[in-house]
Amino acid sequence: MNMNMEEKSISALLHRAADTYDPGTSFINIETARKTGRRRQRAGRALTTIGVAAATAVAVAGVLVLPAHFRTAGTGGSAGQPAASARPSEKATVTENEAPKSFASMAMPAAFGWLPAGFSGTLPGLNSYLAADQAQIQVAAPDNRMLDFNVSPWTGSAKPAPDPAAADPMKTLGPAPTVNGEPAYWTNYGLAWEYAAGGWAYLSSSNYLGSQDVPKGWLDQADASAQTCSRPSPSVLKCATPPGGPMSAQTKAILEKVASNVRWTWKTQGWYSFRFTHPLPAGWRITNASVRDGAGQILVATTNGDNVLALGFGPQDGQNANCAASSATTVTLDGIPWSSSSERTAPGSMYFLATCAPVDGLTGEITVYADGMSVTGGTPQPLPGVSELGANPAQTIVSWLKFLGPNPANWTSQPLAR
Amino acid sequence: MRHTREAEYTDYVAARLDWLRRTAFLLCKDSQSADDLVQTAMTRLYTHWGKARNAANLDAYTRTILVRVFLAERTSAWSRRVTLDPAYQDSPAKGPDHDAVMDVRQALQELPPRQRATVVLRYYCDLTVEEAAQIMGVSPGTVKSQTSKALATLRNALAHAWSGAA
């Protein structure tokens, strides 16, 4: 490759930057990659075999056969549970008292029945991340104390996963008092308990997204060491200094009480500030749902797992940075200015649309992936359904949306067109 | 047979892990995000190992996965909810060019993800415009324009360092 002097200098600097990279402790785990990969292969085969509708039934089956006390412990335990019957073959794969194999992607599995003073378990003071293989709920107090609640579907592990022997920062420190009769352990991040056979729930008091101002008396030394933690992805908590050491009796008592009062509702509790008035194209399904600052966002992918649409709107987002992007143009839709941009790719394009002024009090953005950024095949392919969206897919998506305003009381838990 | 495939995968990833982490670090700006990217790419590679192990250039296949996972994550709506504690900074190993390395890392951080990926593919992986375009799934013209913008940003960011070194 011919390079000019400037390019050669850049190249040399990049190589030096990479060569001098000293990452220190690695959290990468090949075994975890293999396990997760195998699980996704199985899930992919199941989807291929039984199709989208049946795949939904699998998730429903997981809910329907949960232990009886999970279905009745919470308020409205049956609310939000689809009435559709599960196929016998899928239902048979989950036995009584066994954790579900996967979660419904938009359903929060549980709610808090008790929280320490200052915490709010109700929207909008709640962040969450919901996917088939993980549910995460985060609550915060105004003084930046945080509780992080994670639930995994069936892992088959008899102890909190990941395995202490694996190269993962989480370690089991010892047994904890049972949580509603279920086995529990203390880990270096907090409390873990087996909410159903093979499925684990985790509760920690880390303040990884919070400020450095940790109120005294709440976090002990072990927790406080997590101040330099971050969560680069929803499933990973990383710390410059892995927390360890004894946890204060006060922290333990609080975590035990929160855990024992968790209500397993399995109902959809994400609230969305928008609603689709048009059905999604065939072959699209919601793979992740998240709630950030109380406002729901969703990611839609094809049945092959390729991202095809991402959108989120809320009163908290403010002016979108994309409005200032030099490559964007302003389009007016129903009197509202939007920042529109696209990126030409092979064989399609990516389309972005961001609100430059509030739409019914909401701001946010839409991304349509039309380029087939798939690694599932050798040659990128146009994603299914995108051709139905016309010349500007993002603008078509806008026309399919009804915005519900900034008041969470008017939002919906069912954003898809029925 | 399965055992052989698993062993091949494990051996390959173990052997190429250092390379993957360094490439991911240049893309991601910090070691934590880089580790996550590598972990995700490794998982993706495993799910496609049957195809990957027969690829003409396995490293190129793996690099394509790494870059596409990086780009897909950075364009998702909720990548915004990922927050890295600014107090936690990676520092290069001490050496005679410590400051220069810090400068180029800082300059890379100022690039948008796609421009950063373009620069890494072109000037770290030493790929041609066409090869970079194929990996990123964009046209060669897009790679050229992204490269041009990235070089302009890097030129400005590194001007001080270069003038100080002169």
Image (cartoon, rainbow, N blue to C red):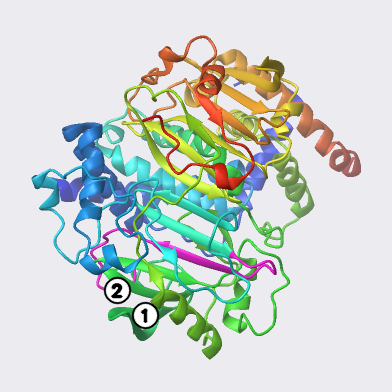
Say whether residue A3 is visible.
Answer: no
According to the picture, the residue beneath numbered tag 2 turns out to be: A159
Marks 1 and 2 close (CB-CB < 8 Å) = yes
Pointer 1 and pointer 2 on the same chain: yes
Q: Quadrant of residue A10?
A: top right
Q: Is residue A229 above or below residue A339?
A: below
Front residue of B34/A257: it is: A257
Which residue is located at x 48 percent, y 26 percent? B135
Q: Which residue is mark 1?
A: A185
What range of the chain is rendered magenta? Answer: A140-161
From this viewpoint, is residue A211 visible? yes
In the picture, measured across the screen, residue A7 lies left or right of residue A131, that is right
- Magenta span contains residue A159: yes
The kind of secondary structure element at disc 2 is: loop
Quadrant of residue A145 in the image?
bottom right
Residue A39 versus residue A158 in the image, above or below:
above
For the image shown, how many numbered marks are present on the structure? 2
Q: Amino acid at mark 1?
A: Tyr
Vertical arrangement, residue B79 with respect to residue A176, above or below: above
Image quarter where the C terminus of chain A lies is top left
Measured in 3D between alpha carbons, the distance from the residue under mark 1 to the one under mark 2, in whole angstroms, is: 8 Å
Give the overall secondary structure of the magenta segment. Answer: loop
Percent of width and height locating residue A191: 43, 76
In the picture, the quarter occupied by the N terminus of chain A is top right
Tell me the chain of label 1. Answer: A
Q: Chain of mark 2?
A: A
Which residue is at the front of the view, A358 or B109?
A358
